[in-house]
Image (cartoon, rainbow, N blue to C red):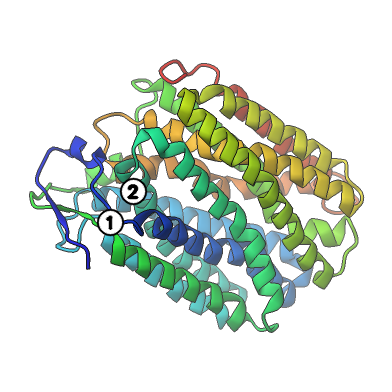
Amino acid sequence: MPELEPLSLPRAAAFQGRPQPRLFLPMLVLAYLGAALAVLSAGFVSIPLRLSELDPDHKSQTLSLTVAVGGIVIILVSAPLGRLSDVCTARAGMRRPFILGGALISALGMLVLAFAPTIPVIIAGWAVAQAGFGATTMALNALLAEQIPARIRARVAAAFGMSTGLAPALGSWLVGALPGNPVYWFGVPAVLALVTNIGMVAVLRDIVRTEPVPVGWRSLVRSYWINPVRHPDFAWAWLCRLLVTMALVSVATYLLYLLTDRLGLSAADATAAQGMAAGVLFAASIGTSVAFSWISDRTGRRKPIVYSSALFTAFGLAVAMVAHDLTTFVVGVALIGMGQGAFVCVDVAMMTELLPESADAGTGLAVIALSYQLPQLLLPAVATPLLALGDAGPNYTALFLGAVVAAVLGGLAVLPIRSVR
């Protein structure tokens, strides 16, 4: 096991990188992919399929409730766990216990989902899985700010973004290829997530704190907060990520039902089409992700790429909104993918550079994580009334229109930022 690096320096030292073995970067990306595969395949494919079996007449409402509970759980745990990780004095290091412990808890939640006989048990299993996922991704994201220098951070963030983009496509394909049994739907992705994160823990040359830092409930509560008045640039960047993520989550969550209810596909065909759409989104995002992360790192410019890509995402959502056939819809998805490829990697790099210098990596990245976790909680409050507009069943046009507006506002939120170019 790699040698650990002792640390008894001030908190700002957590941002200083440590020499890592050659396997560090590939294992970091694989661990992120493994965690994303387990959770996104469950949230976007396996759980909707299972709810369609258990309660076909109320599947949309039940899915909204399940997503909301999972969102509440991950919001409740991420920021305090980030703070606890920052001050962790375990001999194994600051991040290792949270990477491995989170992966184990997430696997336990997926096990509950695999054998869940009722909707309440599905909701409970999803809550456990989200708690574990929150711990793992918090620690992995902290490594991005902590161990990756700014000169290559957008490119590493691009690899994270491509992992997240690949996960739904890979998950849809995997669930479709596995036997039609929830044990396989949830169990196989959980095992893959566990194996990749064990590999990450094995190669990581972690920081070890030797000087204890007192932690009370007040400091845990404060871990949710970076003052927007004192740090307005960070607040604007945070709002941008929240709105753009809200736009994407609102569409992705109901994608399976949109394909069956609006485009008239069967459940089996819709699952295959969902996997194809996720694959197209991922393929379209690769080129812009690689190109614009390189351009951003080379030029040091973040803002123009972030707001332009957010507006391009809105354009893709508008194309998908007017689609009444699968081909047009996939074209819209491809445009969304092109916008998101540039947005995700450069936006993450920009937000890490806007963190207050006094923030620990885990705490700061947990606050950033809230910007893409809150949409899961806000989604039912926003999507349910939009889908209920009119008398002809779920109003997917209203849902997409709301997503377009959110993406446009997210792009405009970047303009007031002054401390990053």
Q: Which mark is residue 95?
A: 1
Towards the viewer: 97 or 152: 152
Q: Amino acid at mark 2?
A: Leu
Compared with residue 97, is residue 409 higher up or lower down, i.e. above or below? above
306 sits left or right of 96 in the view: right
Q: Earlier in the sequence, mark 2 or mark 1?
A: 1
Q: x, y percentage for residue 64?
A: 65, 57
Question: Can residue 372 be seen in the rendering of this structure?
Answer: yes
Is disc 1 surrounded by few (<14), some (14 to 19) or many (20+) residues within 10 Å?
A: many
Question: Can residue 395 be seen in the rendering of this structure?
Answer: no
Q: Which mark is residue 143?
A: 2
347 sits left or right of 8 in the view: right
Q: Amino acid at mark 1?
A: Arg
Which quadrant of the figure has residue 108? bottom left
Which quadrant of the figure has residue 382? top right
Q: Residue at x 39, y 33 (%)?
A: 151
- Label 2 and label 1: CA atoms lie apart by 8 Å
Q: Quadrant of the N terminus?
A: bottom left
Q: In the current view of this chain or complex, which residue is farthest to the front?
A: 22
Compared with residue 31, is residue 216 higher up or lower down, i.e. above or below? above
Q: Residue at x 40, y 67 (%)?
A: 103
Q: x, y percentage for residue 112?
A: 50, 78
* Label 1: element kind: loop
368 sits left or right of 47 in the view: left
Q: x, y percentage for residue 195?
A: 42, 73
Q: Residue at x 23, y 55 (%)?
A: 206
Label 2–label 1 contact, CB within 8 A: yes
Towards the viewer: 398 or 161: 161
* Label 2: element kind: helix
Q: Residue at x 38, y 30 (%)?
A: 353
Is disc 2 surrounded by few (<14), some (14 to 19) or many (20+) residues within 10 Å?
A: many
